Image (tube, helix red, strand yellow):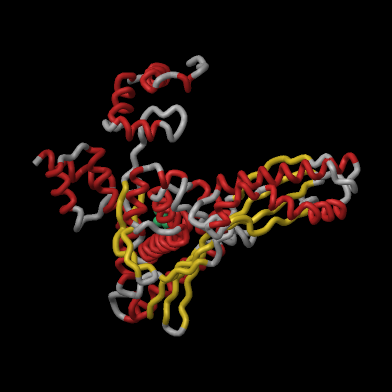
Amino acid sequence: MTAPIQGFSKLSKEEKINWIANNYTLNTEHTKEVLKVYWNSDTKLQKLHDEFIENTISNYYLPLGIAPNFLINNKLYAVPMAIEESSVVAAASKSAKFWLSRGGFKTTILGTEKVGQVHFIFKGDEKKLEAFFNTIKSKIYTDADELTTSMKKRGGGITNIELRNKTEDLENYYQLHCTFETLDAMGANFINSCLEQFAKTLKTEALVYADFSDDEKNIEVVMSILSNYVPNCVVRAEVSCTIEELSEGNIEEAQHLAEKLVQAVTIAKVETYRAVTHNKGIMNGIDAVILATGNDFRAIEAGIHAYASKNGKYSSLTDASIENGVFKFWIDVPLALGTVGGLTNLHPLVKVALDILQKPSATELMQIVAATGLAQNFAALRSLVTTGIQEGHMKMHLLNILNQLGATDEEKKTLTNHFKTNTVTHSAVVSAYNNLKND
Ligand code: MEV
């Protein structure tokens, strides 16, 4: 067994690679070579990436693709997507093109409220705590003035601070439940700095509050942190068309398709196993844009899945209806995004992605992301209820299999042509490849 190491972070990048390759891999030289192949020859750019995190040894590439033809509120976007799954960008593009000629996506911001909480323990009389909170509330705001001035100037800041009694859930547990408007910033640093200041005011003011007993004076702040659950930072994206427009075929086919799409959504509404996969497909689109635009996909994932369970049961994020001959398909999704600060100012590819999107505000980006998620879900459901998912999936996966087999460009061309009219399975590709080789 390899011995633990002290001071790994102090080693140079080269030393880190040597240590990891020598201690944890069998093909040491290969490991070192691969890790270094991914270093960027532009040393300034490489240094930038090295410094994003601790203990960087290389870069991890994901393809950056474009899904063009997204018509959102009558504005045309080409959406950058960073993702490894072969069929995702193709599906988004197909869906965007489909809706382009049917009025495109309509989106509405339903709210932009961000949340943070100071969690604390108070052992005493709840009524006295309430009176204390009301006495110091304005001081909580003014003590944070220095932190909020510039955000306020731009039209944002703290929107509310509320005392919440959570003692039914946990003995002596209370919170300051706080809401914020952070405009184009995701706002994590702003919110966390404000919360830590609120906690300080709460603690120090309690110590000198005359009506408190000694126990009550001793408020114990457990932690102060933003919440990634943002049920009031929500965007709606929707598409609609008449039933006739839904299918390129005849009206019966279109009616049948509309009904099956609604059934598919209804199943995802009531059945958790399906809902998770249904939403996973939506996240294919959402995460890819989140990553490309330098946002925090873990925060977004956590918030969205909690939102999908907001009624006590995990359910579909999308909805569908047929009314008066019109098929409507929509999503409500919480998205706390930023288009300034964080990686958006640092990562050259993120900056390019935001340029491609015409430098969107955070609310505009929310709308683009929601539309992409909806497009992805539409593409998945349409395949699932018609041809099945594997046809498209395996077509896109064909190149991966051919690459694994080591096919040349010429062989890939021949075999891609062959599989235009043949079903793609792993074994079919292997045998077609071998046949070609033996010709
Ligand atoms: C695959 O990445 C996503 C799908 O499974 C989504 C779905 O089933 O709706 C195709």
Quadrant of the snapshot with the C terminus: top left
> Observer-nearest residue: 287 or 358?
358
Q: Residue 238, percent across and down?
A: 44, 70
Q: Estimate the x, y position of residue 138 in percent, counting from the top left.
A: 74, 55
If the picture is divided into quarters, which one holds ligand 1? bottom left
Residue 22 is at least partly visible in this image = yes
389 above or below 9?
below
**Is residue 273 something that shows in the picture?**
no
Q: Residue furthest bottom?
A: 324
Please give the name of the residue rendered at 20% of the width and 37% of the height, measured from the top-left corner: 406
Identify the image quadrant of residue 403: top left
- From what the image shows, is residue 201 above or below residue 99? above
Figure check: 304 above or below 23: below
Q: Nearer the viewer, residue 31 or 266?
A: 31
Figure label count: 0
Where does residue 45 sit, x and y in percent of width and height? 33, 35
Q: Position of residue 338 (x, y in %)?
A: 47, 52
Query: Who's the residue at 31% across and 58% down the image?
Result: 67
- Residue positioned most to the left: 439
Q: Residue at x 40, y 58 (%)?
A: 360
Closer-to-camera residue (413/204): 204
- Residue 315 in which image quadrant: bottom right
